[in-house]
Image (tube, helix red, strand yellow):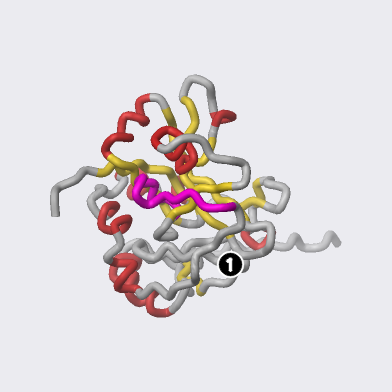
Amino acid sequence: MSDFKLGIVRLGRVAGKTKYTLIDEQDIRLVENYAFEARMEVDADGNGAKIFAYAFDIVKGRWTGRPLHELLWEKHRGGIAPSFQVVHINSVTVDNRLDNLRLVPVGWSPKPEEISSKQREQSLYWLAIQQVPADPVEEQYLELSRTRYYNANGELVEEEECSCTYYECHYPPCSLIERRLREFNICGRCQVARYCGSQCQQRDWPAHKKQCRERKRVLALESEPER
């Protein structure tokens, strides 16, 4: 296998995890003119959510943001007709290598396939982000990596129970995301990390236990009635 290079761009935290996007070597120079972020799109039919990489022109501002996979397709392959869409062949929606993109009719969906944990651990996305050094800011200031919660109107709320936040499995190689709110298992100790199943939770424990802290609940003290 011949050597090849990939660009790995940090998108930030979404769905409880720090996400990155993969791009081809020829597209690495996009970082000179574009900023990147992760955005979650909730399926209107109730089929959960997906995470995509968005890019926006640094000079023009965030309002110019658009899905990175669409930008790359138009750059290299041409326009996208109204009745077509660009999809990710391997279902990893942040893997934006051109070989992983395909133009299909709107409404097209791949055949559902069961992907084993071993396959996820050997995926190019996971193998690539393993090369990324740990973020020293996130490691030192864990509060900066705290998940923010939003309600159905997009308003920031204090409590998770009032939010419409979908989670991705906390085990790094796994990119499964909830199809229903509160679907995944939650770590009973920290009450933060969520997993698609016990197998991923067990595999993640050697790494997660280093940061897992028992959640301290703040009890509201009721004032005594005046006498």
Question: Quarter holding the N terminus?
Answer: bottom left
- In this view, which residue lies farthest toward the bottom? 198
Instruction: Identify the secondary structure beneath mark 1.
Output: loop
Q: What residue is drawn where x is 48% and y is 67%?
A: 194
Highlighted magenta segment, given as a residue range: 93-105
Q: Is residue 213 above or below residue 113?
A: above
Q: Which residue is mark 1?
A: 179
Residue 132, position in %: x, y?
26, 48
Who is closer to the viewer here, 136 or 77? 77
Q: What residue is drawn where x is 26% and y is 57%?
A: 127
Q: What residue is drawn where x is 31% and y is 44%?
A: 8
- Residue 215 seen in this snapshot: no
Residue 17, position in %: x, y?
44, 55
Residue type beneath disc 1: Arg
- Residue 60 seen in this snapshot: yes
Q: What residue is drawn where x is 57% and y is 47%?
A: 84
Q: Is residue 132 above or below residue 124?
A: above
Residue 16, position in %: x, y?
48, 57
Q: Residue 11, located in which quarter of the rendered image?
A: top left
